[in-house]
Image: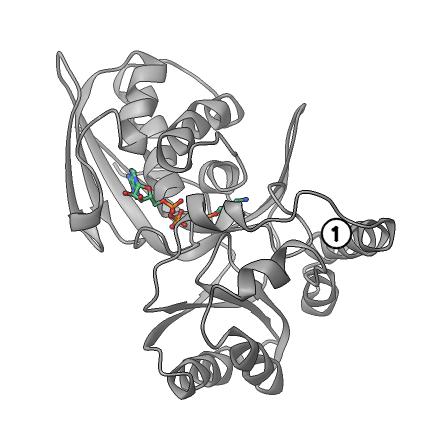
Amino acid sequence: MVTVRAPATSANLGSGFDTFGLALDRPADIVSVERAHRTTIEVTGAGARYIPEDPEKNTVGAVAEALDAPAHIHIDKGVRPASGLGSSAASAAAAAVALDELYGLGHTREELVPVAAEGEAAASGEAHSDNVAPALLGGFTVVADDGVTQVSPDLSLVACLPDIVVSTRDARQVVPTSTSMDDLVETVGNAATLTVGMCRSDPHLVGRGMDDPVVTPARADLITGSEGVEGAARAAGATGVTVSGAGPTMLAVCEPGTRRAVAMAMIDAFDDAGVDATAFQTSVGEGATLYD
Ligand SMILES: Nc1ncnc2c1ncn2[C@@H]1O[C@H](COP(=O)(O)OP(=O)(O)O)[C@@H](O)[C@H]1O
Ligand SMILES: N[C@@H](CCOP(=O)(O)O)C(=O)O
């Protein structure tokens, strides 16, 4: 048996729609695989009852198919589905690494990115790689048509998950199909600022660079209380706040030493809007890790 842990991830980071991704230190999915003649799947843990065990509908089934590596696959979910924390991607990335090891296929992590992205297509209808890349490689990743770039910054983060369900499939429907030149120029400037901030582990540059005039405002409307949560997090020491992935999680980048206060402020602000929430006080994490 081979067992792999793969982390939650936060995609987009505001200005990097379908491009930027960040691995979080926690939460994570744990996937175990054993050789079999055909693929079967068993799911336990957070939100397990909402996740299909049919290999054609589960992200790990698509990965097993893409690698031609049938197995009995057990997924222990630490990342709740439809959270905006790359839940489907965490399983896909863990399965890709585990099946590669089980069958001795020898793929690099970069080669496994498009394989795990096949799993994402099973969940959201599109093979976007911005969650699976950090789930496989760790740190901050930029996915482009010609490959993935990665750095490992040191940042304090809070991911606050409200008790609301937003599916990635639905949240992709509200993304504007065109934008103005002014918004394009602003977005490029913010994305570049964020990237420099990641290279320097600078929470102020990263926070500033997360501002996004195009996609995030459209999606924030799907998250009850998001405006109040952003204001409260900033007042408590966050340097930037955005919708994580397709939502509903809100991600805050924090000044060192303010993580706990930011987490409490975000939970209280959701509570003021009548929404229960859980906050993960976390940091930038590693990619999928094999257990001995
Ligand atoms: N292994 C898996 N883990 C989580 N969700 C999965 C998995 N396989 C398929 N899904 C489906 O994917 C959808 C959740 O994915 P998504 O909306 O992208 O969540 P998240 O925003 O957390 O990544 C749900 O419909 C879920 O049933
Ligand atoms: N770029 C995608 C990312 C979706 O992330 P998830 O964690 O919500 O699955 C998008 O914004 O649609």
Q: Is residue 182 above or below residue 235?
A: above
To which quarter of the image does residue 26 belong? Answer: bottom left
How far from the left and from the top, in percent, is residue 224?
Answer: 45, 73
- From where the camera sits, is residue 257 visible? no
Relative to 150, is 172 on the left or the right? left
The C terminus - image quarter: top left
To which quarter of the image does residue 291 belong? Answer: top left
How far from the left and from the top, in percent, is residue 55?
Answer: 22, 26
- Residue at 49% across, 66% down: 250
Relative to 184, is 50 on the left or the right? left
Name the one closer to the observer, 219 or 266: 219
| Secondary structure beneath label 1 | helix
Name the one closer to the observer, 276 or 238: 276
Relative to 161, is 77 on the left or the right? left
- From where the camera sits, is residue 66 visible? yes
The disc labelled 1 sits on which kind of residue?
A: Ala
How far from the left and from the top, in percent, is residue 135?
Answer: 45, 41
Relative to 137, is 52 on the left or the right? left
- Residue at 73% across, 58% down: 197
- Residue at 80% across, 55% down: 183
State the residue position of label 1.
191
How far from the left and from the top, in percent, is residue 196?
Answer: 77, 53
* Crowd tier of the residue under label 1, counting other residues whose Cα lies within 10 Å: few below 14, some 14–19, many 20 or above: many
